[in-house]
Amino acid sequence: MAVIAVVMMVSSCRHKDLCLLHPHTVPIRINTDWSKFIEKEEPSGMTVIVYPQDGGSPIFARSNDLSHVLVYLQAGMYSSVVFNQSENEFGSLEFRNLKDYHAAEVCVVHAPTKWYTTRTENEIVAHEPDWFGTDTEVNAEVTKEMVEKVQHSVMQSKGSESNTRITKSGIDLIYHTVENVIYTLNVKIHIKNAYNLRQARGAISGMSEGYRISQATRSNRKVTHLLEQWSLGTHADDPTMGTINAKILCFGLPQSHRSTSEENTLTLSLLLVDGKTVVNYTFNVGDLIKEGETEDLTLHLELEIPDPLPDVEPVDGDAGGFDATVDEWGEEIEHIVTL
């Protein structure tokens, strides 16, 4: 009876060791390169999702080590996705369908606003997105030979240095190079009689709501982004001429964008130095938004308001001047401008 007990104990220990090493699986090292993304923002961690192509449940791996993660995979074909941070660490992004490789996407969070009135029933106002980088890999294969080799190594070299090295470092199989997918939209507007301008605010419609991760394409659903932070510059040779500039982050233009004017509308409100006169402009600008010429993801919109701002008297005790702060404004004068 004692002999039988010893045999059972040895068998149990061996089975336990194999269980700890995930029998019938291979330790796979997924390597990630962030050199093309860190210039935007250095993440404090990452998420890797591995999708079995046979329809099995995806494996989520999160790590503060940006160089790699280790996952245990059975023989089969896999696709994988990597992105910065975890899903819950973004204040202005939400994730949809992450358990489905083909449907996974990231989208901007919708943001109600006090001052902007939507022009259509279905118009959605959204936050600027956080910096987001991602990459995908398809058709990575874990072969039966890999599994058999690792299991044979476990059985024959249990506790050896070579076996420990395999299980701790994994087999290099998948490589990701993460790149930014967030655009910077730069807006420049030329204004005559710029000395009459006190504040500016605006909104641009028809921008993409998000990014379809596995397809590496921008969503065709549209949102409106607010342009609330403007800076004013004047021309050195003509102080009556000025430009106002705004910059926001976005997911860019929808994938189906055709560069027709009506696809994007810029609404602009200008508060004059009297503190009460507000002039509104509406521009159709879908044909004026241009891709930047550098490798960075940038969009540029530049236009001119055709008529000079009306001359008004500054508020009593106020010398006038441009103020970047957005306050509640009073009555407004509407202008629809055809470019």
Image (cartoon, grey):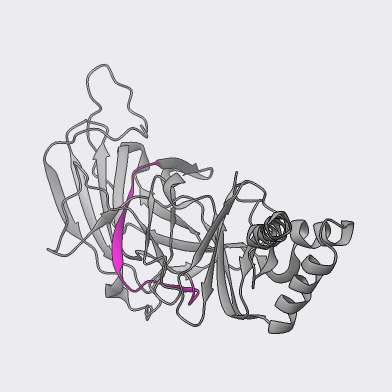
Residue 308 visible from this viewpoint? no
Q: Is residue 188 visible?
A: yes
| Region rendered in magenta | 214-229
Tell me, yes or no, whether the highlighted magenta stretch contains residue 228: yes
- Residue 326 position within the rendered picture, expressed as x and y whole percent measured from the top left: 29, 35
Q: Look at 27% across and 32% down and name the residue there.
A: 273
Q: Residue at x 49, y 51 (%)?
A: 86
* View extreme (right): residue: 161
Residue at 74% of width from left, 63% of height from top? 170
- Apparent side of residue 311 relative to residue 150 in the rendered image (left or right): left
- Left or right relative to 22: residue 201: left
Quarter assignment of residue 304: bottom left
| Image location (x, y in percent) of residue 37 | 63, 56
Q: Position of residue 34 (x, y in %)?
A: 67, 57
Residue 299 versus residue 10: which sits nearer the camera?
A: 10
Q: Is residue 216 magenta?
A: yes
138 relative position to 57: left or right: right
At horizontal 76% and vertical 71% (from top left) the residue drawn is: 150
Q: Residue furthest front?
A: 1
Towards the viewer: 163 or 207: 163
The quadrant of the image that shows the N terminus is bottom right
